[in-house]
Image: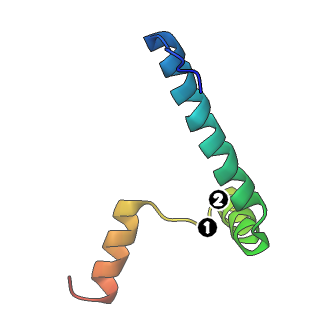
Amino acid sequence: MALVMLDERQIELLRRARDLIDELLETLEVASDAELMQGIKEAEEDIGASRIRGYYEMIKKLKEVIEI
């Protein structure tokens, strides 16, 4: 078995390639999950229809409902 020496640039390119492959695998995993994709679609529809609340608005509403 031959030993291969890589310079820093080549090592960094391999790291970036590995990271891109990891991201691609995560994307494929999400895309193949029908239930998760349906949830994302519904969330996008909620955003488009302004059926969402901001963080501070949600905290204010929680304080109205329960004592925090």
Query: Residue 47: which numbered mark, if any?
Result: 2
- Horizontal and vertical percent for residue 22? 60, 44
The residue lying toward the viewer, choosing from 30 and 54, is: 30
User: Horizontal placement of 13 versus 36: left or right?
Assistant: left
- Horizontal and vertical percent for residue 58? 39, 70
Q: Dividing the image into 4 quarters, which one contains the N terminus? A: top right
Circles 1 and 2, Cβ within 8 Å, touching? The answer is yes
Q: Relative to 65, is 49 above or below?
A: above
**Mark 1 residue crowding within 10 angstroms, few (<14) / some (14–19) / many (20+):** few
Point 62% across, 35% down: residue? 20
Q: Dividing the image into 4 quarters, which one contains the C terminus? A: bottom left
Q: Relative to 28, is 52 above or below?
A: below
Task: Write down the quadrant of residue 41 in the picture.
Answer: bottom right
- Horizontal and vertical percent for residue 9? 49, 11
Q: Label 1, on which residue? A: 51
Name the residue type under label 2: Ile
Point 39% across, 61% down: residue? 55
